[in-house]
């Protein structure tokens, strides 16, 4: 939920651990560590080891503390002249906010750093909404790990098992569709293991969300939203449709009024106000943007003034389109074309984006 | 084969038909009309009608002649003040070079223009090689039909049948994967029908090409090549591979030494010279680019001096990597990991791009 507050590139900017004051600031930023990432088989493996204190694997808020402690205990940072044989092997799992912060810390350390992630770039998640609407190119909100951290060795793979006794991570290259491409398994030995694989989106068990909603967590989500938005307008442009059908094809529902949902609404509104009249002038009157929020306020984590200002802005007709914000509107079920709400009402939709549980 | 000669945006620049001299120039440019496009069920339908002179459907070189004739015969261009009821309905099938040239001609004409194409943008094909290597963003080499030709009405669909008696085209919306998206069928009546659906890539019946080669005709081809190129380097970066395995994973074969193949080799060489040392410094020595050409020269359609200069440049080691150009090297068969040549030799490859038969 903190992603709206992060300044550009704060995640990959070099951050030094020099004093308690700065470390405090780091820890605050660190609340965004568990945002992106990829859960999979590894998550199951991980839960088996979570209580084990023999190896330094910490998720989310514990990552930087752990690294900080280990760096100071082992004096990696100050040991620039140690012989190569003495170099510790640090393996970092993940390439999101946590991994980038850690790698920035390690850049002058006298250790061998290896990064394992199925994604070879850092993704600046707060700008996903812009990428989803075409305000930004997807490529402009990522930074290749190799470019950001040239001293680290990167492997495009995911960790499938950790052996804390032998101090090894088993990895598998990620599935690819290339010609003659095959899954390859390998083991990495480590002295220190840093786990920053992040969290996955919580659908709170609401039926149909996984099957029918779009998300906004990975770059591919933004690309998909943009593609589907285009389809929706093209579909609504076809001849022979009734007004009701056009409205249905142009009803976009955002579920969750946290920073992600609110930001996406803003981007959508800009798109409708600036681009739709130019490209789809016949369709301007048919577009509906609905923002659903289970609680009774938008931007729950922020203060009251900001919440009110955001709500006023969303509901205002200033740009020729008001967002239909519905508070205390819990989603009960999502089907291929409808969303059922807790008050018994139903919305027919074209695209539904799940921005809750991030 | 003429795409290398086309200047930027010549296809969508407004071209006036004012005199024979200019018309001659137009007809020359028109040799690129049949490049992009999409063949499908419609192609079969079309062949049934091709001999029928009742309707104005012409492919490739005949398109602009036909439009030109019809415009002059019917005086669309000069009849700006005719009442709306008298407006002729012109339906254009396609959104490539031919369609754009035609639509530019029609922009001041007093007729209702409708465009039907599964692609809602014009694609500047000569820059596909740049997009394939990341020199350009894919989005920068397209122009939305609606933006280029705001007076024309566009439908994202493909034509499935033409009724020359009733003067109607049957269309179906293109398949999409959106939520609640369905194929929709509709009919468009026309007074003039202009067919610019272009040609599809010729694989000359070589076994395995369709299954295993990448192409470079649509925007999605460029995106796919770039993605697969990334996979290849990531695969080759994994630990535990032999030198031979790394070389195999980084062997890129371009089949066909026309403008497309030669340009792609140039882009690949730039990538290897400029980006690989920075991002994959351990892999520089393993990259191989092979250019296969069935005839005994590169750039067949150009003059001898240019052919020689191109061949020298390709084979030179100036940027630290020479392209392995093999002339008189006909491809017999492509399998998942090998290419068999007419001289009996075999190449193990990672990516193969079919740039012949365009």
Image: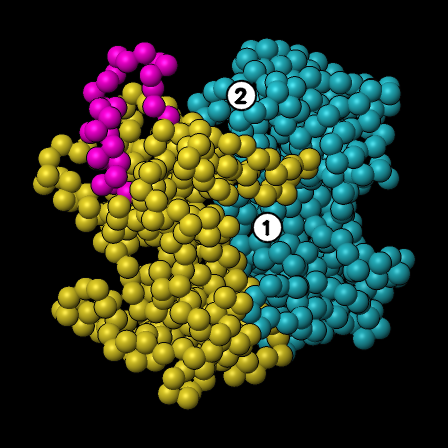
Chain colours: A yellow, B cyan
Q: Indicate yes or no whether the magenta region holds residue A80.
A: yes
Examine the rendering and report whether any part of residue A283 can be seen: no
How far is mark 1 from mark 2, CA to CA?
A: 37 Å
With respect to residue A108, does A317 lie above or below?
Answer: below
The residue range painted magenta reads A63-89
- Label 2 Cα neighbours within 10 Å, binned few <14 / some 14-19 / many ≥20: some
Near mark 1 (Cα within 10 A), the count class, few <14, some 14-19 or many ≥20, is many
Of residues A157 and B17, which is closer to you in this image? A157
Residue B267: quadrant of the picture: top right
Image x and y of residue B297, in percent: 77, 19
Disc number at residue B305? Answer: none
Residue under label 1: B122
Q: Which mark is residue B283?
A: 2
The residue shown at (71%, 18%) is: B325
Question: Is A233 left, or right, of A83 in this rendering?
Answer: right
Residue at image position (50%, 79%) is A338
> In screen coordinates, is B311 left or right of B241?
right
Residue drawn at the location 84% of the way across and 36% of the way down:
B206
């Amino acid at each position: 939920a903190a992603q709206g507050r992060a300044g550009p590139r704060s995640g990959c900017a070099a951050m030094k651990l020099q004093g308690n004051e700065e470390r405090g600031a780091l820890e605050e930023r660190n609340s965004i560590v568990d945002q992106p990432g990829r859960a999979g088989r590894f998550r199951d493996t991980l839960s088996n080891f979570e209580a084990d204190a023999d190896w330094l694997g910490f998720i989310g808020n514990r990552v930087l503390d752990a690294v900080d402690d280990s760096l100071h205990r082992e004096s990696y940072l100050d040991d620039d002249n140690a012989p190569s044989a003495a170099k510790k092997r640090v393996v970092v799992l993940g390439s999101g906010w946590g991994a980038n912060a850690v790698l920035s810390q390690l850049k002058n350390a006298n250790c061998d750093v290896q990064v394992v992630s199925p994604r070879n770039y850092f993704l600046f998640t707060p700008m996903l909404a812009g990428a989803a609407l075409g305000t930004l190119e997807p490529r402009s909100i990522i930074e290749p790990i190799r470019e950001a951290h040239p001293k680290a060795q990167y492997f495009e793979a995911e960790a499938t098992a950790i052996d804390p006794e032998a101090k090894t991570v088993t990895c598998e290259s990620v599935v690819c569709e290339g010609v003659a491409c095959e899954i390859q398994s390998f083991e990495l030995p480590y002295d220190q293991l840093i786990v920053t694989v992040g969290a996955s989106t919580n659908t709170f068990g609401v039926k149909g969300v996984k099957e029918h909603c779009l998300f906004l967590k990975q770059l591919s989500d933004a690309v998909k939203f943009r593609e589907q938005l285009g389809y929706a307008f093209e579909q609504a442009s076809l001849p022979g449709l009734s007004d009701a059908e056009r409205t249905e094809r142009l009803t976009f529902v955002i579920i969750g009024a946290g920073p992600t949902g609110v930001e996406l609404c803003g981007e959508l509104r800009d798109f409708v106000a600036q681009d739709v009249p130019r490209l789809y002038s016949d369709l301007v009157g048919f577009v509906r943007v609905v923002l659903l929020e289970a609680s009774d306020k938008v931007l729950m984590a922020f203060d009251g003034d900001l919440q009110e200002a955001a709500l006023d802005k969303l509901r205002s007709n200033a740009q020729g389109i008001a967002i239909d914000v519905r508070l205390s509107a819990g989603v009960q079920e999502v089907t291929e074309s409808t969303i059922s709400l807790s008050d018994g009402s139903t919305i027919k939709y074209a695209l539904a984006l799940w921005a809750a549980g991030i």
